[in-house]
Image (cartoon, rainbow, N blue to C red):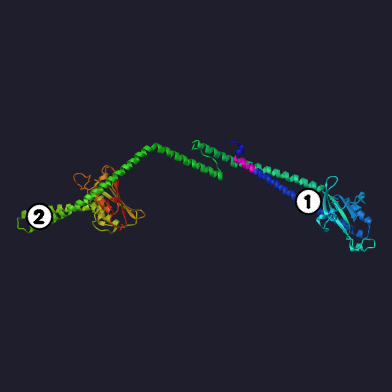
Amino acid sequence: MRFTKLLGFKLFLIIAGVMLSGTFIFSAVTVNWHTRQYMKTATQNVARVSDVIQRSMHYSMLLNRREDIEHIIRTVGNEPGIEAVRIYNKKGEMTFSSNQDDIGKAVSFADNACSACHATGATPVTPGSSDLTRIFHSTERHRIIGKITPIKNEPSCATAACHAHPELQTVLGVLDVTMPLHEFDESLGELERSQYTNAFVLAATVTAFAGMFIWLMVNKPVRKLMLGTEQVRAGNLEYRINLNTNDEIGSLAQSFNSMTENLLRAHRELKQWTFTLEQRVREKTEELRRAHVNMIQVEKMVSLGTLAATVAHELNNPLEGILTYAKVLKRKVAETPVSPELKIELEGELTIIADETARCGNIVKNLLLFSRQKVGEFREADIAAVLSRSVNLIDHLMKINNIRCETRFTTSERTLIADPDQLEQAFLAITINAVEAMPGDGVLRIEVGTANKDDAFVIEISDTGVGIREEDIPHIFEPFYTTKQDGKGTGLGLAVAYGIMERHNGSIKVRSNINRGTTFTITLPRRQAEQDTPSILTSTITV
């Protein structure tokens, strides 16, 4: 970049121009002020000398002692700093002068010494008027200041016997005192030269220091910033500007370094995204697949729930009839006179029919719970008490299998609106599955907390058992689906728990690892909406 286009050079020119203009204007004002003061002093000096001479001659004039007047004029006129002392009469003739050659000469009223009073149309001037003071050049070309003092016809002078001036004549003559100004002019010239020289030196010194300051504090940092931007433009995002200053440019450098760090981080992230894009696409595809599977599972559960409700309603009445007639036949057998052996046989067979019919009734009830039909009623319940009863019901089972139960509450809240009997049945189904998954020994952990600003309970029931295979997890809430061998399970326990949580507008999440255990996470709202329980499609099963 050309030197003349640099910001520092432009600042230097501005500072230099302002300093030179300012100092020279100040010097001109100072010289002008001193000139006025010198001229004021010179005017006061010539006025004082003229007044002293006039007072000195006053007594001699009253007595008409011309020798005394001449002596005073010559003595004063020959003093250093006095150019000449003259007295003019009314006709403009020099009657007295410190220079003997001037006596008797006449001056024109148009001369600069007389024009103030004798010019055409001139107004009378007072003795102290500045118009009686004049400045002119001598034959040697140096300036001279003169003071004209009128000599008035006083009463004591007009009535004296030695004078013949009439009383009406107000002015008898004038006293003209002149003083050279070459010493003043030399002093002013020396002052002017000194003032302008000092102003130039001051302006040059300040400008030089300003130039050094601009070079060090502006030009060099700006060049570093420019170099940094060129490096970033060239793709070097690791370049850093080293400026350890606390001013605006230092803050700009820190912002630049922060910007390049962010750009470098973003560039690396983009490269990493480029390298792992295929993996991320596979992950997103897998997430979509799982979401699709989950939707299919939800639809399947809806269909199963509808089917379960239909079957339950269709089977409930015939089963109720079979159970009733079995009890009636059992009573009739008891009243019929038959042999004891036959009676025992018939009662046993009728008991089997009644028990099996009751078992079918329980299955129908569980199917209704799974399909979220309204069984039982909602009321205020203590979640801790519900969990405690569920654990107590399997206490003997845990002791047989050497299982330790750990319960932990992370919230002080306990109450919720729910059907406690159904919740107990759901927790019982989940904990029984957990115990059966830990043959020999293990730990059953139950933790209760809150979520959503304490509007819902979060209950985690985990075990250290064998776990659930990944392919079985999507089916564990389906009715009659079981992984237990030898017909030990009906496959309705978790299905019933699912239906109960659905009725309570809750959700169940499952995560499991083979041989490392399974965790059921249950979310239950503490308050229920006043409207009817939502349909089965509103709840979620998260695998």
In the image as oriented, which residue stretches furthest toward the front? Answer: 120
In the image as oriented, which residue stretches furthest toward the right? Answer: 161
Residue in the picture at 58% in, 39% down: 220
Which class describes the residues within 10 Å of circle 2: few (<14), some (14-19), or many (20+)? some
From the top left corner, tell me how far across and down residue 98 is, in percent. 90, 51
Please state if 160 lies on the left or on the right of 419 as rendered.
right
- Label 1–label 2 contact, CB within 8 A: no
Quarter of the image with the N terminus in it: top right
Residue in the picture at 92% in, 55% down: 69
Which class describes the residues within 10 Å of circle 1: few (<14), some (14-19), or many (20+)? some
Q: Amino acid at mark 1?
A: Tyr
Q: Quadrant of residue 278?
A: top left
**Considering depth in this image, is 67 or 345 the residue closer to the camera?**
67
Residue 142 visible at all: yes
Please state if 364 lies on the left or on the right of 344 as rendered.
right
Q: Tell whether position 220 is magenta.
A: no
Please state if 6 lies on the left or on the right of 150 as rendered.
left
Q: Earlier in the sequence, mark 1 or mark 2?
A: 1
Cα–Cα span, label 1 and label 2: 151 Å
From the top left corner, tell me how far across and down residue 137 is, in percent. 83, 47
Q: Which residue is mark 2?
A: 347
- Tell me the number on the disc at residue 38: 1
* Range shown magenta: 6-14
Image height check: is 4 above or below 300? Answer: above
